[in-house]
Amino acid sequence: MEILDGKIELPKGFVASGVFAGIKRSKKDLALIYSERLANISAVFTTNRVKAAPVILDMERAKKGKAQAIVINSGNANACTGEKGIEDAKSMAKKVAEVLEIEEEDVLVCSTGVIGVPLPMEKVLKGIEVAALSLSKEGGYDAAHAIMTTDTFLKAVTVKFNVEGKDITMTGFAKGSGMIHPNMATMLSFVLTDASVEKATLDKAFKNTVNRTYNMISVDGDMSTNDTAIVMANGMAENKAIQEGTYEFDLFYKALEYVNKTLARLIAKDGEGATKLIEVNVINAKTENDARLAAKAIVNSNLVKTAIFGEDANWGRILAAVGYSGADFDVDKVDIYLKSAKGEVKVCENGSFFAFDESLAKEVLKEKEIFIIVDMKAGEFMATSWGCDLSYDYVKINGSYRT
Amino acid sequence: MEILDGKIELPKGFVASGVFAGIKRSKKDLALIYSERLANISAVFTTNRVKAAPVILDMERAKKGKAQAIVINSGNANACTGEKGIEDAKSMAKKVAEVLEIEEEDVLVCSTGVIGVPLPMEKVLKGIEVAALSLSKEGGYDAAHAIMTTDTFLKAVTVKFNVEGKDITMTGFAKGSGMIHPNMATMLSFVLTDASVEKATLDKAFKNTVNRTYNMISVDGDMSTNDTAIVMANGMAENKAIQEGTYEFDLFYKALEYVNKTLARLIAKDGEGATKLIEVNVINAKTENDARLAAKAIVNSNLVKTAIFGEDANWGRILAAVGYSGADFDVDKVDIYLKSAKGEVKVCENGSFFAFDESLAKEVLKEKEIFIIVDMKAGEFMATSWGCDLSYDYVKINGSYRT
C-alpha cells in the first residue's frame, strides 16, 4: 500500500471543485464532488435527534446505496431551519442534478456551520453553477478547503494499492474542529475510490472502520446535528467486485481503515484551540466494549484534557475517568503509562501511586503528540481513542463563535 | 420555615471544629463533627468504580444507619492509595473514637484533595487530637472552612421549623469546585439536624432530594472518587420520630430539599473558574427522566458553557445538546428561552430559528445568574439542573492543579 499523507489524488472517474459562493465572508464555502459513473456508497450520520435538513435528506437517499454527486456548503449548517431547511436542501440537490444532468435522487447534500439560520439560497444556487463549471481532476484540494469551518489545516490522505493487477486509488478528505465527539459529530468526511466493491461489503467495511476511527475521537464531548461520513466506490478501476472474506477484502479494509484513521487523527489534532494530540490506548481489557468505554471516557475528560494542556502527569484523573466510564475492570490491576517521542513513563501501578520520575514525565508531556496507555491486565482486548487538550483558546473560540 | 442563608447553626447536641493539621500548606485542613447522641444517618457516595479509601470504609459503616462523628480532611483525597489508604482511613476513625470515647464503628471518614498520594498520617492524627479539643457549638464555620479545596466561598445554610411544638434546626455545609458532575462528584456535603426521624424515612427523603439536587449539578462532567453526602439526625429535638406519609414528613422533606438545593446551587456557582451560574429548567417533558436527561446534557455541554461565558445567545447548541441527551422529544415542538434579572427572551420556537431581539438577549446574558428554559410541549414533567460557564480560568486552574 502506497501512502500519500496530506495528498488528494482523485480516483478514476472522479472530479471535484470548491468555490466561493458568498455564504461565508470571504473564503471558499461550496464544494462539489462528481463521479462519471453511478457509485456504490455507504454513509454514516450523526445520532443526534436534532438532525440538520441535509442529514434528513441524505439518510433517506443513502438507503438505495447509490449516488453520483455530493454538494457541500460551509458557513451555514442548515440545521434547526424547519420545513424551509428541507426544501433548501432539496433545491441544492435539484440544482446539482440539473447542471450535471444526473438524477436528483443521486445527489447527496452536506452542510456545516452556524445552526438556526436559513441558507442564502440565491447565493448557494449560483455557487453550484460555478462549482459545476469548475469541476476538475485537481479540484480535490479546492473542495477540501471549501468544506472547512474553524479548521486550521487541510485534512487529506490518499492510498494506492493493487487488486488482481488493477491499480486502486482511495482518497479521503475531511473537516473537523469543535463539537467533535464519539458517535460522529461536527465532522464531514468523504472517501472516494475507484475500486469495485459490492454494496453490502462496502457497508460492512465502512461501518466497522468508522466505529473504530471517527467514533473514537472527541474534541469537546458535544455532538453535532450535521455529521456525515460518506464513501463512494465507482468501480472504474474495473477490478472484480470485492467481496467479504477474500484476500482482496482484507487489502481494501486495511486501506479504508488507514484513510479513516488518518482523517480521524487529523480531526482530533485540529480540535478548536488544541495544542496537543492525545492518543489513548486501553489494552488488555476484558472485552472490546470495556476498552472502548474507558478510552472514550479518558479522551472526553475535561480534567484530563486540561492536565495534558498544563503538561501535568495527573494520572489520578485518568484513573478516575476510567472509573466512571462504565467499563468493567479491577481498579487494583490498572497500570498507566504516559508516552511521547521523548520516552515512556509508568505513572500508576496496580491502581495506586507509584514513585515515578517527575522530570521525565514533564519531558514526555512537552511533546505535541501524547500517548496515554492504560493496561487493565484483565483480558486481551484493546481500543484506541483520539482527542486533544483543552486550552484557553478553546474557550476563546467558543465563547464568541456565533457573533 | 425560617431560612438563614449562608449561616451554620449547629442543632442540639452537635459540636464541630476545623483546624490546621499541616496536610495543606497553610489553610485549615481537618474538620470534626460530633453528636452527643448516636444519630440516625443516611449517606450517598460516588458511583465511580474508583473509590477513595474513606468512601470504601464509609459505605460499609453506613449500612447500619448510625453514626456519631465524622472526620474530614482536605488537601489529600486518600484515593488510589491501595491497602495503605484503607488502613489510614481506619486509623483516622480509630483516633477519633479514642479521643471522643465512642465506638470506632460509629465514626465516618471523608477526604478530598489530590489523588494518589499517601496521607501524612502523623500530622493527620495529631490534627484529630487538636480538632477534638476544639469542638464547640460555634465550630461549624471552622469545619466548613476546613473541608474546602479550590472553593472560593463558604457554602452553608440553616433552616428552622416546628414539628408538633418542637423546634427543629437543620444546618448544612458543603464543599464543591472542579470535577462536579451529576451522580455525585468531588463534593462533600454534611447535613445535621436534631429532628427525630425514622431511619427508613430519613433514607427515602435524603436519596430523593439528593437525586434532584446534587445529582443535577455539573461543573466539568468529571466524577470524582471521593464524593459523599451525609445527613445525621440525632433526635435531640425530642419530637415524635417522623414517619413517611405524614404532615411532619412533608415539612421535614421540604426543609431537607431546601438545604440540599441551596448547597447544590452554591457548588455549581463556585465551579472552578466560573463567572456565571446556569440554571436549566426543562418543562413539559413526556417523563421526568426525559426532562432530567435533557437538563443534564445542556448543563454539561462545553459548547453551551463557553457560549454563556461569552454571553452569546447560541440556542442551536442548547438544542443540539437536548438532541444527543437521550431524551425522547419532538424537535419541532421545542421552545427555548433565556432569562435573567434583566428579563426573558424567547430564542427558539418549534425547534427552529426565531427572530429574537439580539440586544435584549445580550442584556439578559450579562447577568451572573442565567436561566435556560426548554419547553418540550410534550407532557407535564420537569427537571432542573445547575452548572456554570466554562472560562479561561477553568483551564488555568486545572492545567496545573497537581503541581
Image (spheres, coloured by chain):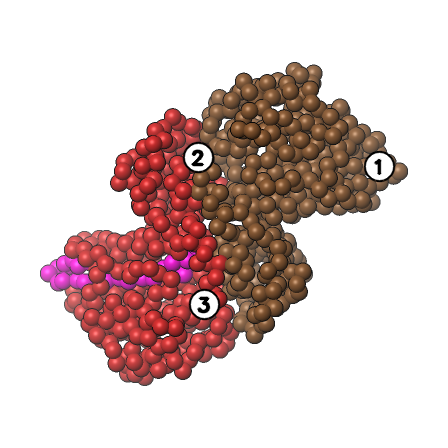
Chain colours: A brown, B red
Image height of A189 relative to A315, above or below: above
Left or right, A119 with reference to B24: right
Whether residue B176 is in magenta: the answer is yes
Left or right, A21 with reference to B399: right
Left or right, B87 with reference to A270: left
Q: Secondary structure at mark 2?
A: loop
Q: Nearer the viewer, residue B15 or B246?
A: B15
Q: Nearer the viewer, mark 2 or mark 1?
A: 2
Q: Which mark is residue A403?
A: 2
- Say which label, 2 or 1, has the lower sequence index: 1
Tag 1: residue type? Asp
- How packed mark 1 is, by other alpha carbons closer than 10 Å (few <14, some 14-19, many 20 or more), is some
Q: Which residues are magenta?
A: B159-187
Both marks 3 and 2 on one chain:
no
Q: Quadrant of residue B174?
A: bottom left
Residue displayed at 69% across by 23% down: A134
Q: Which mark is residue A3?
A: none
Can you say which quadrant of the picture contains the N terminus of chain A?
top right
Distance between the Cα atoms at labels 3 and 2? 39 Å
Q: Nearer the viewer, mark 3 or mark 2?
A: 2
Q: Residue furthest left?
A: B165
| Tag 3 subunit | B
Disc 3: which residue: B114
Left or right, A73 with reference to B139: right
Q: Residue furthest front?
A: A26
Tag 2: residue type? Thr
Q: Which mark is residue A167?
A: 1
Distance between the Cα atoms at labels 3 and 1? 57 Å
Residue displayed at 30% across by 67% down: B145
